[in-house]
Amino acid sequence: MTTLTTQPRATGLLDRLGVPRALIWGFIGLTIFMIGDGVETNILEPFLRDDHGFSTSRVGTLVTVYGIAVAIAAFFAAALSDLWGPRRVMMLGVGVWVTLELAFLCLALTTSNPWLIFITYGLRGFGYPLFAYGFLVWITAVAPAEDRATGVGWFYVGFSAGLPTLGALTATLSLSLLNLDFYQTLWLSLSLVIIGAAIALVGIREPVGRRPLVDNPEEVSATLSRGFKLLATDKRARRVTYIRTINSVPTYAMAVYFPAYFTDELGWKLGWFLILTTVIYAVNLPFNPLYGRIGDRLGWATTMFWAGAVACAVTLAAVYFTPLIGRSLGVSDPVVYGVTLFFGALFGVSLAGYVPLSAIAVAIDPEHPGAAMSTYNLGVGAAVAVGPLLVAVFLPLVGATGLTLIMIALYLVAAYLSLTLRGNQPGFDGVPDNVPEPLAEQAAAAAEKN
């Protein structure tokens, strides 16, 4: 049995910020990769509608298929990281993304074949979760327990900076300043993905993520099925999945029905909605590591309950109902829109309140961080499909107002579920403060012994 040694904690700038210094190139590469992936966010629907004869509903169906692939890949990314190591999973994600994007650009779009478009774009949904969430597992495997939620917060800075914030901005600049068309802009997207992946995979030298994270990787079926077993046997794991899905559902639902709400019901410009989206996710970025740090200090579940679930319910309601109330009071549209932007910024801040959830997920099964994270990642991917699905089912039945109330109610459900996850954090709620050393320290101790 290996005797673990305590490593002195570094005090450099990255360490004070809670960024694992060994993974810094991964954070940079992730950001560029996700910028490339996010380029299509605001241009796919008009491109396929205008240039390839797709209806808006057909594009919605395509995105749902894509979302299902994202959910599956997100779930298996963590388990495969246990089995193969995060780096190999990231490499697989890059290969899938690039290969299917080339097929999408060179075969499906040039022939305008609907089946090829569905197959190539839909299956490409397996790509980015393997890359991004493989890296997320790498972070949780090497970050010190006391800074784990902070490290995850920085992950979401890179992730959200690309998708949708800077990705959408890149598309806008490509179309307006570079005068590229939709098709050429998608080639730019591919280039950014390749550059980001190369920076991450070449730049990271950290050894833990280059090998399996479990002691018995030869037991393939047991490793891959552990995430399923957690979902089946541990209600905490299921609640992590539910909460994570609810966290991101409005992100994907609002992209579908808010443009029509802005233009048809309010009579505002579509550009105002795009500015609102940019504000929400730009403001969100710095608060991801901040709420990670707050969660590490004040309690993961407590932070998620107040700063995440409750705050999201209140601020989403403010974003939607402010224009309606302002109009009924006779306030001018520019003033009402300014107030809406303010509440949109608060909504972006509130979304960051969910950052500690990933640390809670790992704490459920700390000996198998990848399997534990698979339940979390499943929720991330499920939101990509569930958001548009809620719009398709409920928008015709209850309208935009009813759909927004449903999402507010879901946030309140997440608040209740958050309370049931108390006690997962060492040092809080009666749990002994005896956190096992992170895998990176174990590896260093073993190397010293050998």
Image: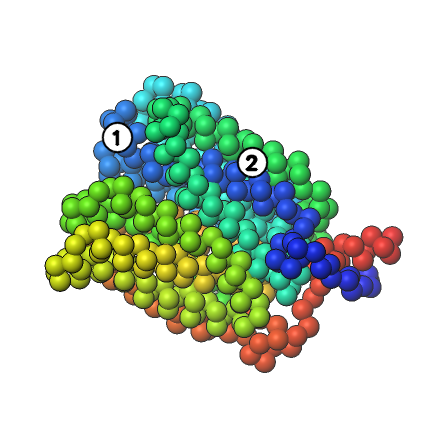
Instruction: Please tell me which residue lies in front, 210 or 428.
Output: 428
Instruction: Please tell me which residue lies in front, 41 or 64.
Output: 41
Which residue does the image show at 36% across and 56% down from the upper left? 345
According to the image, what is the colour scheme of the structure? Answer: rainbow
Could you tell me the amino acid type at mark 1?
Arg
- Left or right, 406 with respect to 367, comes to left
Q: Where is residue 360 in the image (x, y as percent from the top left)?
A: 54, 65
Q: Is mark 2 on a helix, strand or loop?
A: helix
Instruction: Please tell me which residue lies in front, 283 or 134.
Output: 283
Q: Is mark 1 on a helix, strand or loop?
A: helix
Which residue is most to the right?
450
Report the disc number at residue 196: 2
Q: Where is residue 180 in the image (x, y as percent from the top left)?
A: 37, 24
Report the disc number at residue 164: none
- Left or right, 219 with respect to 194, comes to right
Q: Where is residue 441 in the image (x, y as percent from the top left)?
A: 74, 58
- Left or right, 250 with respect to 71, comes to left
Q: Residues within 10 Å of mark 2 (few under 14, many from 20)?
A: many
Could you tell me the amino acid type at mark 2?
Gly
Q: How crowded is mark 1: few (under 14 residues within 10 Å), some or many (20 or more)?
A: some
Report the disc number at residue 49: 1
Q: Quadrant of the rendered structure where residue 55 is?
A: top left
Q: Can residue 189 be seen in this view?
A: yes
Q: Position of residue 182 (x, y in %)?
A: 35, 27
